[in-house]
Image: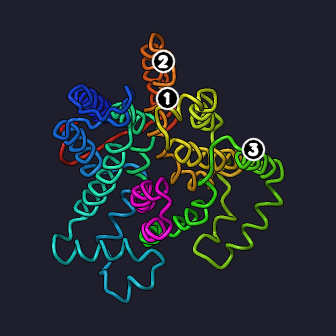
Amino acid sequence: MTMLWLNLCVVFSFGLIARYFASFRVADGTILSVRPHKGLIGAAFVSLVLISGLRANIGDTFFYKHIYETNDFTWEYIFEQNDIGFGVLQKVLQTFVSTDPQIMVFTSALITNMLIIFVLYNNSRMIELSLYVYITGGKFLVSMNGIRQMLAAAIAFTAIKYVMNGNWVKYSLIILTASLFHQSALVLLPVYFIVRFKAWSMQTVVMIVCSLLLVVGFEQFSSILYTALDDTQYGHYKNFTEGGANILRVAVDGIPIFIAYLGRHRLREIFPKSDYIVNMALVGFIFMMIATQNWIFARFSLYFSLYQLILISWLIKIFRKQDQRLIYFGILICYLGYFFYENVITLNIEYRSDFFIR
């Protein structure tokens, strides 16, 4: 864990200093956007990529490295797989770069973190807070576990611009590209029409009520869903028996949304397009609620949880100015506690690398 703690300190510090030297776009006395110092954000990015890309373990890393080492990525083999985008990426790396599996791990980390930071740079109010929650909230660790899906989620995350602007064609093209790396990204296609409405309207109430009904009637819902998935690559999920998501994880996702509801009017004033971010985060929370019945549904929440990183960075500003410092440090402490609980107490994460001194 030493390298993960060090990474947290480095990334947060560079993010904080980058915002201190940021440029601002102001209209009518209100800050509309913040552009942190690119060089300092670049330093935070380098830290994330080095820690993730040079790892030797965590989650499915060994499995992915083994596949890269033992398979010859011919076109025939690639098109036999369901997620051909990742196969093409591996073929390109094997052919033109190296057969060393660490290259695949490093490249995946590079692309994933580059896309996520690009979106945060352009949309976060306090980027250091977004980066801090990216690590302490568990998304960074997930990027080292589910490589393909997190890569797909990062690609899909870049479609945020077209959610806000209402460009369905460009949005769908990005989602289809993401689905080449993990087909579950296709769930984002219909979601576009679900989130393109004012947050906390009647549609929001319907979404929440439906999710509660799904949780209560999960057995009936799951039997229908698994029947529909039976002949797909996800048909084996019906045999998944590892239980539901931790209720603490649900609370971590739910509290920022609840705060956003309380300060919804102020949030719209300072961030006019926040409704789309709130709606995306709310859909992720709904998936987490369903995941309390079966953990596998938490996989879908991954595509939406990245929007929480943007939402949290704006929540500070909905409070009174004299309270903002207290809320800011409260968020830091709470997420640090969650990071320690999840990674040290629950998962007992041990980070290993062949490139760093233990």
Instruction: Give the answer, above or below, for where 34 lies relative to 150.
Output: above
Quick check: marks 3 and 1 in contact, CB under 8 Å?
A: no
Label 2 close to label 1 by CB (< 8 Å): yes
Q: From where the camera sits, is residue 351 visible?
A: yes
Q: Crowding at label 3, few (<14), some or many (≥20) Cα neighbours within 10 Å? A: few
Q: Residue at x 62, y 55 (%)?
A: 296
Nearest to N terminus: mark 3 or mark 1: 3
Nearest the eye: 74 or 111: 111
Q: Which dot marks residue 205?
A: 3
Residue found 26% across the figure and 55% down from its top: 110
Single out the mark in the foreground, 2 or 3. 3
Quadrant location of the N terminus? top left
Residue 193, image x, y percentages? 61, 61
Q: Which residue is mark 2?
A: 327
Q: Which mark is residue 22?
A: none
Mark 1: secondary structure:
helix
Kind of residue indicated by mark 1: Leu
* Residue 47, image x, y percentages: 23, 41
Q: Is residue 172 magenta?
A: yes
**Foreground disc of the pair 2, 1:** 1
Residue type at mark 3?
Val
Q: Residues within 10 Å of mark 1 (few under 14, many from 20)?
A: many
Q: Position of residue 77 (x, y in %)?
A: 38, 85
Which mark, by number, is residue 315?
1
The segment highlighted magenta reads: 147-174
Membership of 41 in magenta stretch: no
In three-dimensional space, the C-alpha distance between marks 2 and 1, rounded to whole angstroms, equals: 9 Å
Q: Is residue 246 above or below residue 302?
A: above
Q: Are marks 2 and 3 in contact (CB under 8 Å)?
A: no
